[in-house]
Amino acid sequence: MPRLSNVIITLKGIDPGDEVTPTLGSFKMRIFNNSMKLHEFHVVDDISLSHDGIIGNDLLKNFSCQVDYSKRILQMENDSMNLNFSEPLYTIPPRTETVIECTVSNPEILEGVILDQHISNTLLIANCIVKVKENNRVNITIANTSEEPAVLHSDLNLTLEELRVQPYSPLSKSLPSPNSLTRTNEVIKQLRTSHLNREETESLLQVCSDYSDIFHLPNEQLTFTTATEHRIRTSTDVPIQTKSYRFPECHKKEVENQINKMLEQNIVTPSDSPWSSPIWVVPKKLDASGQRKWRVVIDYRKLNDVTIGETYPIPQITEILDQLGKSQYFTTLDLASGFHQIPISPEDAAKTAFSIPQGHFQFTRMPFGLKNAPSTFQKLMNTCLSGLQGSRCFVYLDDIVVYAPDLPSSIQNLTCIFERLRRYNLKLQPEKCEFLRKEVAYLGHIINNEGVKPNPEKIKAIIEFPIPKCAKDIKSFLGLVSYYRRFIPDFSKLAKPLTSLLKKDTPFNWENKQQLAFENLQHKLTTSPVLAYPDFTQPFILTCDASNYAVSAILSQGQIGKDRPIAYASRTLNKAECNYSITEKECLAIVFGTKAFRPYLYGHRFTIVTDHKPLQWLFNCKDPGSRLIRWRLKLEEFDYNIVHKRGKINSNADALSRFPVNPVEGELLVPDTLSPNPISENPLEDPLLELPFHIPTTFDDENLLNENVSRNPTSDTAVNPYQNPIPGPSTVPDFPLTPEVEPELIDLGPLDLSPRSADLDLDLEGLNIPSPTDLIQRPSMNLNNDDYSKFLKTISNKESVFDTVLKEHNENLLKFPHKIILIPTSIDLDESNPYVSEILNDNPNRDEILNAEKEPNSFLNTKFADKEIYLLFTKVHHFDESSYPDIYDSLKRVRDLILQNGPVSDIAVSDFKNPFDQHSYTKIYNILTYVFHNTKICIHIYLNKTIYPTLSERSKILRENHDIPVAGHLGSTRMYSRIKEQYYWKGMRGDIEDYVKKCKMCQENKALRKLNRAPMEITTTATAPFQRVALDLPILFVVRQQKNQQIA
């Protein structure tokens, strides 16, 4: 091997396995014996090449070479050499067919057939009709059946077989008979083509003419299929006979005519069967001429009661409608008396017998009204159109819809379907078929290329429905409307006044709210939106929302904010769910939405849009036994991300559970007071941390107070003993009430507005408020000229002196005789705060408090015993952390309202700490000191020393307070009173009750104070020995999930 130079290049096209091949280097060599010239050759690694080397154009030019392709000789000045041309290589991908070129051994046959043959175990040549090219080669089709790519040389040499074709003569085709032409023309006359252009009309008439035999014309014998027959399997062979109904005299002639027609069609036949079912006459809808027609039906209810049911699925209408997107042409086909085209089993025909005054008859074809008739028919249609459903058509019983994106595809689809119907001998009714429509009615809906909407003709019965007079009428109305509920946003909320009358033991009182709900549902159907078709190649958007009594979800697609709805879903909450917190209701809405739209969402990544942030806390929850965690586990099967959308922007889902309200008029918010600069989350950058600790007094001991207190020269009030007193008057101005401070009285009225999102901004555009009541007290926003920034500046001044008196306590503030109590909490009023839990549990206005409209930085005034309780809403959700500006603003507002109502000597405030708020002790004291300066109000701060144990710590606490000897195995009530003095967790009372119930020692040793007596029952007297035996069983204590026990 000669020494290679460092010249490295890349070559393309020499190795079929790689796009480019790098060289290893180059060397020069003499290639011709009669020439001393050297030529540079590049060396490559071993590749799949059938020759030792390849020469290129540079060599041919350097040596003045000439190539004789016919003789395959390379000539130069004084020498020549034979050439071996490199044949092309073909790479055939796995499981595909590829057209390649190969050589034939007998090219004199200009046209012929290449028969199928195996080149290898995985390469197969298909039958091909070929024509020989000028280079004596032909194109063939070769298939690779393996899972790996295959490389094939093109030097294949195949034999061409002679093609034998029988000459075609147009005269050999049989001409249609005059009767056939007449029938075809009659079929064409019944087709509606006025909406089609010339090209569409010609294409349709051509395919219908070719398959005119599949159309049924009046006065023709109705044929039947031989692919299946209907069986009636009953649980008893005892014949059922039902007395015939008496129908009006005017219907007797109609019944006789229809029975005669069915006798002529061989649909019914005279019978001597012992079975008999009555008949009835029902009206059909008006025909095109406006005449009323009638249908004779058989009442097979008694027969159906003993018929063994078959479980064959009927397609879901929604699933069919969802898959009609991206189509421009729609065709609906209707079978002519579809049920009567299926024969009934001869051994079961006697069970279909019926009687009329003219005689006793039985069916030979499958009649309407039998229990398993729809299943039999659907099974036949699925078999008939197998392989075509989902790609060319859909079928629901005898209604077939054919869809396509263009005209050629529509004609091709019709041809395939007509061919199947001909094979199964099924006939269409031409006057009921609609061909090549851009918009068509199908299954009670109007479908077009834009989406789906209700059929106006179908909702006419709903619009004209009379006002319900009883609960049964409401059920009928809701049954009609529910068919189109996916088109109606806010369906559950709108129907709530109606469904409330369906509850057990509820008197039927039709009032204004029921009438309004009745009319609103009717109106919604006439203005319902056009729902878009789902596109399963694009991500879905699930928008969820919850109110105090309903949850809702919207499935849509598109850019958020411009997405088009696909379906609406909503339901009302039951009694237990209405007691859920806001977070739980919002999470329930998400769980409901994913369940309602699971066929769309499962297996696809989608976005959940909500105006709440429940999952932020849900995924950080440390309690794996909570209801929210169970819901989180249900959501783990989905692939989703969550997007927060503010309440006023999230109007589509928000409207499903809330009423729109009027916008606020006039100036209400002041940016200076509502948008203070937030305190940095970094303690090193937090200006409030650097402020002096202004605590005038923090002790209950009066002696200690008197020894350490210094006085402000202008005030007799105690000041901070740790601060250097400043001679002269205080530099902090008083806080006089301005005439503008008048509390607004907000009335919720009948509205039920859930709290807004935590991220709700302060822009008033589109903001709404309800009308007045005395439950929520929200003072005017323009309270004082001083704002949070001024507070920071003032309190950071070391020369500032405050006269506020603060005292600390380590007790439960509700047990002390303070008349005014301030309790910071969240808008969702979650009971993680033990004070909130105690106030709500004993409050007769609990429901009003929970359902009241609440906004950040507002407060709610309620009574608890003889105390005035102010709930300060410093945050939206209990899992949020309230900001210091919000605490400051809330305290200022409640301070002004309290002072306006009269002189106050002291106020009790609970500590601002809870499991989600870990505020600085210094910051809270500074805010209270500043806010209540010059008010002469003593502030009693009740420190929250409550411990919030983890899940693992709770079991230890329960054991220590019940099982150990000093605990004394207390009952659940006394044990709860002991534990709550130090600990608190959500559901604590229930955990304690469960623990006491499961205590084996308590069950074995504690006496039953309530004697359970077995109910007295009258038994029959025994008439023989051992006819009745009584046993005494040992007692086993088994704890039920309820509060009682059972013995076995």
Image: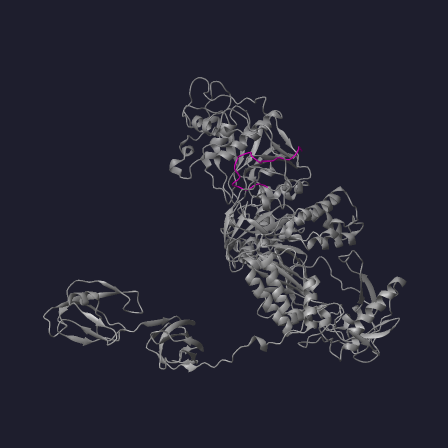
User: Camera-side residue: 356 or 108?
Assistant: 108
Does 951 sit left or right of 213 as displayed?
left
Q: Position of residue 909 (x, y in %)?
A: 55, 35
Which residue ends up furthest to the right in the rendered image?
Answer: 249
User: Camera-side residue: 620 or 604?
Assistant: 604
Q: Position of residue 853 (x, y in %)?
A: 62, 38
Q: Which residues are magenta?
A: 755-774
Residue 836: image quadrant is: top right
Q: Residue at x 82, y 80 (%)?
A: 1024
Which residue ends up furthest to the left in the rendered image?
Answer: 36
973 within the magenta span: no
Q: Position of residue 300 (x, y in %)?
A: 79, 69
The answer to whether 745 is drawn above or below residue 347 in the figure is above
Q: Quadrant of the C terminus?
A: bottom right
User: Camera-side residue: 807 or 418?
Assistant: 418
Does 997 sit left or right of 46 as displayed?
right
Q: Position of residue 884 (x, y in %)?
A: 48, 35
772 within the magenta span: yes
User: Camera-side residue: 95 or 319?
Assistant: 95
Q: Residue at x 67, y 50 (%)?
A: 575
Task: Tell me if residue 106 can be seen.
Answer: yes
Residue 800: image quadrant is: top left
The answer to whether 41 is drawn above or below residue 1026 in the figure is above
Residue 255: image quadrant is: bottom right
Q: Quadrant of the N terminus?
A: bottom left
Which residue ends up furthest to the front in the rendered image?
Answer: 171
Magenta highlight: main SS: loop
